[in-house]
Image (tube, rainbow, N blue to C red):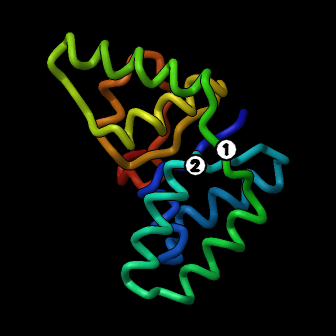
Amino acid sequence: MSYLLDTNIVTAILKKNQKIHQKLGELDILGEKVCLPGMTYYEVKRGLIAANATRQLYDLNELCKKYQVLPSDLDILERATEIHADLKRRETPIGDADISIAATAIARDLILVSHDSDMLRVPGLRLEDWLSTEG
């Protein structure tokens, strides 16, 4: 299996969340692929720059050396437009950043790791919540 990390998960990594670090360590041992969507990189980095969080900026750069950042391409953008239209028709919209992240996971056949309940609205999205208190 391969995984895509949502913005809230990357933020937890940068805050040294042990549950997330343990899960990533397990995946490393198993040789599983872990990636970040370009939108997650953008959301996290803009916040760190605004806060002048130099240590966390360094940690983000190190994380991006370990895990590939996936850029958006036409396939992801097409999938995003489909998700947006579907959610709008069903009157259950979510933010554009979340749509972009979900589209990346679906287009690249990745499991999205997220602690965002809005992602539950996206049909066809495989989702895991490593921060959940359940289980």
Q: Secondary structure at mark 2?
A: helix
In this picture, is 31 found above or below 9?
above
Q: Position of residue 74 (x, y in %)?
A: 61, 24
Amino acid type of the residue that numbered disc 2 sits on in the rendered structure: Gly
Please name the residue that numbered disc 1 is placed on.
70
- Above/below status of 36 relative to 21: above
Depth check: 16 or 80 in front? 80
Mark 2 Cα shell of 10 Å, populated few (<14), some (14-19), many (≥20): some
Q: Is residue 83 left or right of residue 4?
A: left
Q: Are marks 1 and 2 in contact (CB under 8 Å)?
A: yes
Q: Which quarter of the image is occupied by the C terminus?
A: top left
Seen in the image, is 68 located left or right of residue 128? right
72 lies above or below 134:
above
Residue 86: % across, % down: 31, 13
SS at circle 1: strand
Q: How many marks?
A: 2
Which residue has dot 2 on it? 38
| Residue at horizontal 50 percent and vertical 68 percent from the top | 45
Q: Compute the Cα span from label 1 to label 2.
A: 5 Å
**Quadrant where the image shows the N terminus:** top right
How crowded pointer 1 is (Cα within 10 Å; few <14, some 14-19, many 20+) is rated as some
Comes first in the chain, label 1 or label 2? 2
Q: Which mark is residue 90?
A: none
Residue 112 x, y percent position in the rendering: 53, 38
